[in-house]
Amino acid sequence: MIKPAESIIPRTLEKELSGLLNNFSLKIEETVNLGSKILLWDIQNEKNKGGFEGLPIILFFRNYLEQLDASSILIKYSSVEPVNNLLRTALENFFYIEYLLEKDFKKRSLSFLVWTTFRTISYYEKADGKSQSYKELLDAYKQDKIVSNSCPIIIPNIEELKKNSVEFLNQVDYKEVTKEYRNRLGKRKRIEWYSLFGGPENIKELSKYLKYPAFYNIIYQSLSSSIHGTNTIQGKITSGKNNNANIYQIRLPLDIEFLVNLCITLSFHLYHDFTIKRLPERVDEVRNWYLSLKPFLDSLKTKQIAINYSS
């Protein structure tokens, strides 16, 4: 087995650092645990049961928890930078859930289902072996340095799958939303599900509509630079001898306190709003949980891990 360059990626954590990171990880894990209970309570709640319109908020909530759960694992082993990518997805799910909870729950839920179905049909068309979408994908394959000698996958029963999707859209409950989707799409290549029926045009406008403009401008955009791979300089280099640039090691817990605080604080607001609208009998449990963590969150205002490692 190849051994790592220790100055680039140290595999063994110092005991004190490991203890701090393990504690941070456990606090996020606890946050996910509470979220899992809220999710189960909602699924079991007879008042919230309905048709397919109940699925989007459940799946968004599940996805939110999955991003946080993965974050807790990465933080435990000091693999902190990738947490930014996960939290960006979590924040998007946060906005989506808040949008569904705000008003017009059924119409907005159906909007997501219709939007998703149209995207699925678009995917199917790229795998039918004959459509214009397939031909464009085949041309892209020919120009690609890695897959130029291959062809896109053709799904044998694709026509049946497309038919099922079209029949889904033709159901009475979805006709209004399907018509709105087609009207809004027009000559555009893409629209967002929350844009239907006069909704926000993009994630920035969605955050503004939900009254989270600072979250978008400060947090979402910062997390986005990480997911797009454009923050390759800031926080990655430091001055060395003779004014040479030294790069920071991988698995360096930069901004760890901020990220842990964000995980827990964002979750509290999500859980609180969710329970107020869908599980009012559980609101006090969420509030008491958050109050129990206040001393820990206050401790995160002070840097607990000194960053002085570089290759």
Image: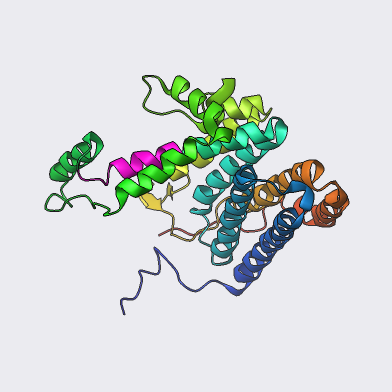
- Does residue 122 belong to the magenta stretch? yes
Q: Quadrant location of residue 29?
A: bottom right
Query: What is the chief secondary structure element of the magenta stretch?
Result: helix
Q: Quadrant location of residue 97?
A: top right
Q: Position of residue 74 (x, y in %)?
A: 54, 62
Q: Position of residue 160 (x, y in %)?
A: 34, 48
Q: Nearer the viewer, residue 264 or 233?
A: 264
As drawn, is 219 to the left or to the right of 40? left
Residue extending farthest bottom: 1
Q: Position of residue 221 (x, y in %)?
A: 52, 35
The number of numbered discs placed on residues in the rendered structure image is 0
Q: Nearer the viewer, residue 177 or 281?
A: 177
As drawn, is 301 to the left or to the right of 221? right
**The magenta segment:** 117-129
Residue 26 visible in the displayed image: yes
Instruction: Name the residue rendered at 31%, 76% in the picture.
Output: 2
Residue 244 visible in the displayed image: no
